[in-house]
Image (cartoon, grey):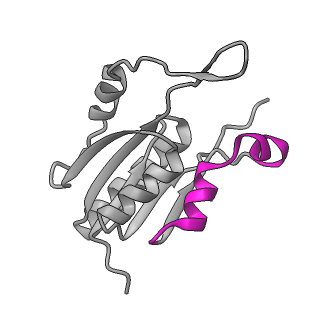
Amino acid sequence: MLQIRTIVHPTDFSEPSQAAWELACALARDYSARLLIVHVYSPPPVYAPDGIAIPFPQEEPAALRARLAELRPSDQRIACEHFLLEGDPAEKILELAQKEHADLIVMGTHGTTGLARLLVGSVAESVLRKAPCPVLTVRATVAAQT
């Protein structure tokens, strides 16, 4: 049987992330696991007219930190930690999972396919391919439009 002691939950604050959040909390409660909540941001690159990247002064991402801190399991018995990281989302999620010896990653997926996925890439797909532990992806159910 899979022992689950540490669960990593990456979030981008989207609807799929919310669905994954609920599942991550339930699993953390049921397995008495520690829950690591992570948001990775990457500042947009700024380019000069000649195409050379210009270093952009970093602001403290206080709004992101506050939003991340609001994510708290409703069950107070669940031990959780928050991580706000900067860089490539897939790389940082994988680094955290490795460093913290994660037993499971529970993350949302937007279900992007085709050309959009080729152009933008998929964080969930990259994490799935390279993760040091099992990855559970959750796609939020979108209400049918009439």
Q: Is residue 39 above or below residue 92?
A: above
Place of residue 96 in the rendered image (x, y in percent of width and height, measured from the top left): 36, 56
Place of residue 37 in the rendered image (x, y in percent of width and height, measured from the top left): 33, 47
Is 69 in the magenta?
no
User: At 39% across and 20% down in the image, what residue appears?
Assistant: 58
The residue range painted magenta reads: 113-133
User: At 55% across and 43% down in the image, what residue appears?
Assistant: 16
Left or right for 3, reference 43 = left
User: At 34% across and 66% down in the image, what residue appears?
Assistant: 102
Pick the front one: 43 or 13:
43
Is 131 in the magenta?
yes
Of the 4 image quadrants, the one containing the N terminus is: bottom left
Farthest-out residue, bottom: 1
User: At 50% across and 27% down in the image, what residue appears?
Assistant: 43
Q: Main secondary structure of the magenta part?
A: helix
Of the 4 image quadrants, the one containing the C terminus is: top right
Left or right for 12, reference 117 = left
Farthest-out residue, top: 49
Place of residue 82 in the rendered image (x, y in percent of width and height, measured from the top left): 27, 43
- Residue 46's image quarter? top right
Place of residue 55 in the rendered image (x, y in percent of width and height, measured from the top left): 50, 21
